[in-house]
Amino acid sequence: MKKSIIIFIMLCLFFIVGVSADGINDIALNSRSAYMINIQNGQVMLDKNSDIEMEPASLTKIMTTLLVLENCQDIENSTVTVDDDRLFYEIRRDGGANLALKTGEVFTVKDLLYATMLYSACDAAQLLAYHFGGNSVENFVDMMNTRANEIGAVNTVFKNPHGLDADGHITTAYDMALIAQKALENPRFLQIVSENSYTIPATLLSVKRSFKYRVELVNPFSTNYYPYAIGVKTGFTDRAGRCLVTMAQKDNASYLVVLMGANLDGEPAPIKTYGDAVSLFEYAFNAYSVVDIAEPGEIFAQTRMIFDENNSADIQIKAKDKICLTLPHGITADMTVAEYTYFEDLSLPLMSGDEIGYVKYFYDGKELCKFAVLSATNVYDTIGDGKLVFYKADGFNILTLWKFVFIVGAAVCILGIVCVSRKKKRRAGRKIPSRKRDF
């Protein structure tokens, strides 16, 4: 009877876990391509056609903004002048969103970045590209493509800095996730996409320009409002359809979603990427938990490492960055499998803090994510018989201790021998008077 009850409970648990783990892939999405990750650990939550070529529309501006931030340290006080508004001719001809920038106007880089990300102003993006490309938009676009490749977005080709339709201007949902992650690591980028509105002060040629964030998820007055959402960027052209990169934070979990190619059936409203994003966020928040394994620098494991046929050692391992897993409710870290892989070229000495490889976590046969790991033990050289010389992380040398003990012991022995020898000499030199006996 007890055995039957146990089996029944196990079957129920398996069913519940199975639904939680796979249900996110069963959500019907309007977007043709989608990619979702947990930002804290890079764990892939959803992958729907993330490797197919798509046109990014204004998602392009994420790369433009990131590149400007990386090339300008003082966005508040650095200024850009509109030398000739003919720079924006094609943007206005093709109906791109713009602020009607005029020849002779002067803006801070901050003004133009907020206009680029919040209002999606193509002329602001074009002006930034011209300025930071050394008076050449083409040079800036080359910089964009080089930076994209450095980030790992190898299937991305930018043809302009604003995202209006252009032949060969393509990316993938996976690549856009890489670019967005890199951008969100920049605190100034995160600050920009955390604002809901912005005002560019009046210039000599224009009144002040005020605008709200075009990502409706962050607008409390929109029917698409989602209280846990943060930016990041919308995009739309007839060829690209509706595109969206956005993130949401709730409790201790943060998710990033890339959605591309919605509303390509010609239906103008509602914007279907918003519904897709909310469905994915809600499922993730309700079905998954973030389980912490180790904080940065925390020792969390020990392993045996083999350096060569004569040398091996038990090494303590610490986390390079925070290690956490995103698991279905009811699943604990003990139910996962950790697999360690070490660099093949590791050699002695090995110092505490040296990066030695990475750990991968698996659940139900599927890889969840991986993290870089560091040695928490110092290992120096051998002492001639295949034994390793160990140092603790604080620099304490075990071999030095044994040398100290040996030296002290030898000194005690020598001192003892000297004392004994002196005592014998004193006895030998002492005269003992003879006693006379009477017979």
Image (cartoon, rainbow, N blue to C red):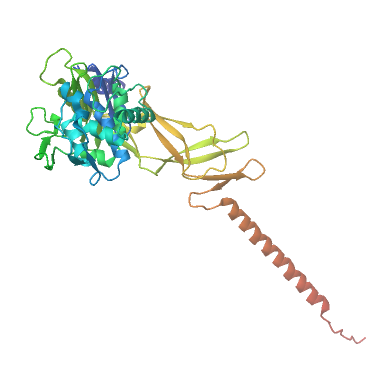
Is residue 331 in view from this perspective? no
How many numbered discs sit on the rendered protein? Answer: 0
Q: Is residue 304 visible?
A: yes
Q: Position of residue 193 (x, y in %)?
A: 20, 36
Residue furthest right in the image: 439
In-image side of 84 versus 219 (left or right):
right
In which quarter of the view is residue 370 placed? Answer: top left
Locate the C terminus by quadrant.
bottom right
Depth order, front residue of 374/96? 96
Give x and y (percent) for residue 408.
Answer: 64, 61
Q: Is residue 310 left or right of residue 216?
A: right
Q: Position of residue 102 (x, y in %)?
A: 15, 34
* The image quarter in which residue 220 lies: top left
Q: Residue at x 76, y 73 (%)?
A: 422
Q: Extreme left residue here?
A: 221
- Side (left or right) of 425 relative to 140: right
Residue at the image position 53 percent from the left and 31 percent from the top: 344
Please tell me which residue lies in front, 97 or 185: 97
Q: Quadrant of residue 195?
A: top left
Q: Nearer the viewer, residue 67 or 344?
A: 67
Residue 158 appears left or right of 113: right
Residue at 12% over, 14% down: 267
Q: Residue furthest top?
A: 265
Q: Where residue 10 sits: x, y (%)? A: 29, 22
Which of the image's four quarters has the N terminus?
Answer: top left
